[in-house]
Amino acid sequence: MNKKLQMMENGPVGKALLYLGLPTIVGLLMTGFYNFVDSYFVAQLGTEAMGAISIVYPFVTLVPGLGLLFGNGGAAFISELLGAGKKDEAETVLASTIFYCFSLSVLSQLTLPFLSGLLTAMGASEQVLPLALDYARILLVSFLFHIPSVCLMNLVRAEGAVGLSTCSQLTGSILNIILDPIFIFSLGMGIRGAAVATAISQFVSFAILVQYYLRKKSYLRLDFRKTRLHSWIVSPILKIGVPLFAINLFQSLSLGAANIAAAPYGDRVVAALGIANRVVGMTTFAITGFSRGYQTFISYNYGAGYWQRIREATKKAYLWGLGGGAVISLGQILLAEPIVRAFSQDGAVISIGVQALIAASVLFFTYGFQAMATVYLLCIKYNRAGFLFSIGRQGLMYLPVLFLFERIWNTTGIYYAQAAADGLTTLVMIGFLLAISKIRNPGKVN
């Protein structure tokens, strides 16, 4: 057993959570930051260009989510197997998971012929569509290595290599920030330059991760001859991966639905909403990053049967998640105007964007609790409940609220729909957790 696995099994719980969570937070925040910077440079090209990447944003967050589907599910299963001392089975799951992700990355290219229709359905106007197509086509091709990269980021964390995962994200993000102005302005490529810069950065991140296995530096050995398509591999992966992918799926659907609801009010509203969503999307990564470290910890200890460590970690995760969420909420509210001004010089866009960002931030802090509770339920095998809650915040709760609020309060209803969905989801989750806390056997499958 290596030192990283020993820390998860025997080290102080708080220290282990910080060790697993902080690098992931930094890595995901940098990923969000380069999306943020990408938007900043594209915004200099005008409101239509900002509207274009706002339309594409739901699509480019959804497809890489396929990497999260198998990456998160595979990582949780591998951590559980390592906790139970089953290294050979863990290596079979590793090879199979990576093979599945490469296969999905190839299949993702089948959407290319339908891209124009998809973007139109997602709210692209005649003025915005050509720019959106220029941006989306290049990013879609980059999914050939971006989907496996997202998967690998999670898999290396399963054996405690959080530093490598963070290094790949930091390197890709910094490179993207450097390349953006070069390709957009110096080379005169405009919005296509932003997409090319992102694609190059994603490939570099992928190369950093894949060499870890190819150079045999990992605790687990990657051998594609061990690849299998068996239910004992696929079923546990999907039980955790599908609900976590559903978060990504419904985030994309909710962003697309918001764009569709906002489209009749004009490109300025779509652009402003896109700015607010990018900001909130970036800060969401901080909480998501910590939840991934928490997931690795409790999956390992669930496999080892250490329930006291799981309980202690869960209490800390709830407290830290809520605290971090509160700090983020307050910061977004107080700094809403300067943040939005960084993306647009259009007075109408700034005014709308500030209102939208404040509205999205009012109850954002509750996501800190929601993310930890969803991971907890999935890792202790309350799979159906975990799945329902994973699609609650931006699916079951958000979508009906969005269209109801839009009909009643127009654009104001669109801006405050997420806050209402956050409040409803949190109340239901608290009620469910209080109910299952009375069950004596915490490992019982739901």
Image: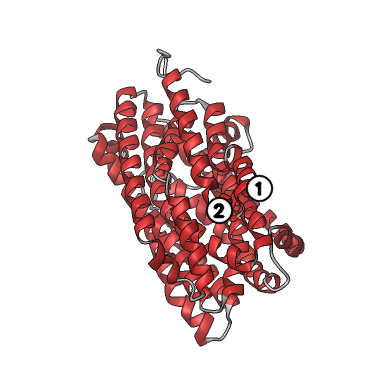
Mark 1: few/some/many CA within 10 Å (<14, 14-19, 20+): few
Mark before the other along the chain sequence, 2 or 1: 1
Return the residue found at the far front. Answer: 408
Q: Secondary structure at mark 1?
A: helix
Query: What is the number of the mark on residue 380?
Result: none
Question: Relative to residue 357, is residue 64 drawn left or right?
Answer: right
> For this rendering, which residue is in front, 318 or 25?
318
> For this rendering, which residue is in front, 154 or 258?
258
> For this rendering, which residue is in front, 7 or 279?
279
| Residue 196: percent from left, percent from top | 56, 73
Disc 1 target residue = 407
Return the residue found at the far top. Answer: 440
* Residue 56, placed above or below residue 185: above
| Residue 59: percent from left, percent from top | 62, 57
Disc 2 target residue = 412
* Residue 170, placed above or below residue 188: above
| Residue 236: percent from left, percent from top | 55, 32
Amino acid tagged 2 = Thr
| Residue 240: percent from left, percent from top | 53, 35
Amino acid tagged 1 = Arg
Callout 2 touching callout 1 (CB < 8 Å): no
Alpha carbon of mark 2 to alpha carbon of mark 1: how far? 10 Å
In this orientation, does residue 372 appear? yes
Mark 2: few/some/many CA within 10 Å (<14, 14-19, 20+): some
